[in-house]
Amino acid sequence: MSPIIKRRGEKFTLPSKYLLFILTIVCTGMIVITFNTNLFTGPLNSFTGIFIVPFQKGITTVGSFLKQSGDRLSSITQLLSENESLKKQIDELTIANTNLEQEKYELTELRELYALDAQYENYKKTGARIIAKDAGNWYYSFVIDKGSDDGIAVDMNVIAGAGLVGRVMDVGPDWAKVQSIIADNSAVSGMVLSSSDNLIVTGDLELYRQGFINFSKLVDDADKVKVGDKIVTSNISDKYLPGILIGYISTLDDDSNNLTKSGTLTPAVDFEHMNEVLVILELKKNVTE
């Protein structure tokens, strides 16, 4: 908007281009006077020192402050950008590390299954993944992702870790339900590997909170059986194939009849952490009910 000049009570508008021209002439004249005369020496020089120099210093200070503020703002903006980039890299590395840990865990589990497969090489087997389980911390009953289409049938034995998990109870085309030996209604005919003495292994979910399951009806007249002995499935089991490791004797006590012994076993399988199992594709022959 053009500046307004009052003349005798009336408003007079001076065009901007003329005002700019006048200011240019004045500035040019001041420059010429400054370089060719001593006009600004003496009193005017003092005036310049008192008023102009501090003003210039103030302008310089403000300019420096604004420059520093701009530099800081630029640095902050750059740091924020780098921070976002680093966060993204951390997220990516975290995901990659999690995937590596998962792969490491799965590799360890697969190696265990491979070793178990070699241990029972006389049996034809198929691997399966657990896709569901009953409520609770332990795999006392669960579902696998293979069924009758893969040759799986009811009563086929299931192994994992270092030994016996349980047996197949129900089968669909692409799934099967497994009951483990720690379930309350589970019973397995077992045998002490070192002495061939027979016993009955029974599940007990309450006892498994302490990491054990029960055994009973052990006849040990010669007192050969000791804590730490291996217990495997026996030849007289009607559902389980012989020689599959069940666990190790943890405690051993004489029954009140003084004829048999009972106690607890530590299972060979960790029933709290399972993802993969092996199903033995054979049924116990000559089953007697």
Image (cartoon, rainbow, N blue to C red):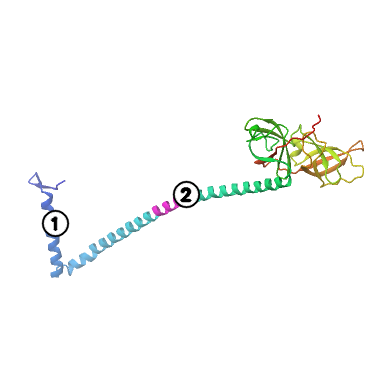
Establish if 39 lies above or below 126.
below
Residue nearest the observer in this picture, 93 or 51: 93
- The residue identified by callout 1 is 23
Camera-side mark, 1 or 2:
2
Residue under numbered circle 2: 88
- Left or right side of 1 for 150: right
- Of residues 2 and 244, the one nearer the viewer is 244
Q: How many marks on residues?
A: 2
In the image, 10 versus 285, the foreground residue is 285
Label 1 with label 2: CB-CB less than 8 Å: no
Amino acid type, callout 2: Lys
Determine the residue located farthest toward the left in the rendered image.
8
The residue segment tinted magenta is 76-88
Identified by mark 1, the residue type is Leu
What is the quadrant of residue 163 in the picture?
A: top right
- Residue 80 covered by magenta stretch: yes
Residue 206 circle label: none
